[in-house]
Amino acid sequence: MLFPFIIVYCILLKHINGSLTIFHSLFTLGIMAKNSILLAAAVLIFFTGCSRGRISSVTRMDLFTLEIGPLEDQINLYELAVNRSNRTSLAMRDGLFYISDTAGGKIVRYNSYGDLLFVIYNEEICPPPITLRRGIDEEGLATRWSINYPLKEPGVITVDSRKHIYTADKVDDEKRSNDTEDGALLDNIVLHFDEYGRFVNFLGQEGIGGRPFPRIMGIYASCDDEIAVVCLMVSGWNIYWFNADGTLLYLVHLRKDSIPMPQADVDYASVDTVAAAPDARRLFFKIDYYRNVIDENNNSMAVPDNSAIWVMNVETGAYYEPVTVPFFEYTTTENDKKITQKLPYAMLGVIKDSHVFLYFPVDGGYSLLVLTAGSKEQRRGFIQVKNDELEYNAFNLSNEGILSGLLATEWEARLVWWRTERLMGVNL
């Protein structure tokens, strides 16, 4: 019964033009749980708001804005009104911002003042840059330049310590294939560019020049500039772990029948997010567990039972002790009776020393929860995102915990960041 979920999803988008990332999570949650009550609760949160109580707000710093459009110093988000599958992605490293502009067919790098430093663009999609030098002949001679490369649909992006860029992209139609065993369309590759934006090679399943990946959900730069590529399939998840030279080191399979389960009696599990640690060969799996219950009308429905983060040692395949994730709780009043609802957080990312950031959409922004593997300590915070900034949101966590955001309004995209020193209780 997908139809009721689609209706709710469309209502959300129509009335509040919400974040693609957040609403995709809510939509997926509803489908996986087959529980319209969960989505109804999500709608209730957005339309009624919820109190943040004593949760401290993390200071937001607005850095610069980009106009909506196809030019080199603009971002092409025009298609959001008709095509909400946009995979425009953001990465921040050492104060430099990298944006893969999916519809614009380009990758750009800005400094924190909003100065455009270089553009990798597809001349068949993106108008040739006017203000930038074409190409770069010798390292360091140009300060602002552009490089033509046949990008198709650049998606998720990451940057390693060398400032090398890795982004997901599509292959030509004739190079696509189907994996009948895993039920996956193989049409994704990872493009590798150096610090000047020059093409180095592409990664496939076996490494450099390998077969296309299934759908890429995330790319992570880890210790020693190793790269983890996270792929989603009908049968589960594949995580490919490469060294800095593009050699495949490890391949992790997480099938639906091998998802780690808690000791509690639950009926099924759903993997929310998979992320790689930036400083160790570790994978973090955020997993939500559900129970089937019978309501007063004798209807069976799935309700969330608990959530956990499982940490895997990639070298051995062994799991560490899971981290319990509390639910996001909010209270409403109905017929003079207070009702407390509970919904799972979504995992935003992992920073160094195994600090895990989770988030949940609330009125005026997002509620944050920070947990640490091997510790019971919890830290909560709130980040402000204005109502007119919900056309499209993309977030990135630096290794040190600086949270950057691309927040799109109807007319512009704002680049902002939140320093989490106060929330983490450390100096970054």
Image: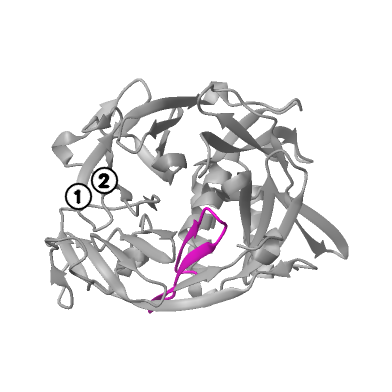
The location of residue 246, given as percent across then percent down, is 30, 35
Q: Badges 2 and 1: C-beta atoms under 8 Å apart? A: yes
For the residue carrying disc 2, how many other residues have a C-alpha within 10 Å: few (<14), some (14-19), or many (20+)? many
Q: Residue at x 43, y 59 (%)?
A: 93
**Residue 320 at x, y = what percent?**
66, 29
Along the viewing direction, whichever of 428 and 220 lies nearer the viewer: 428
Q: State whether residue 412 is above or below residue 199.
A: below
Question: Is 298 on the left-hand or right-hand side of 277?
Answer: right
Percent position (x, y) of residue 328? 72, 53
The residue tagged 2 is: 191
Image mark count:
2
Asked if residue 339 shows in the view, the reply is yes
Viewer-closest of 81 and 294: 81
Q: Which residue is drawn at 55% across and 62% down?
A: 402
78, above or below 411, in the image: above
List x then y, in percent, for residue 136: 14, 63
Circle nearer the viewer, 2 or 1: 1
In terms of secondary structure, where does tag 2 sit? strand
Image quarter where the C terminus lies is bottom right
Q: Which mark is residue 199?
A: 1
Q: What residue type is labelled 1?
A: Phe
Vertical relation: 412 (above or below) 394: below
Q: Quadrant for residue 115, please give it.
A: bottom left
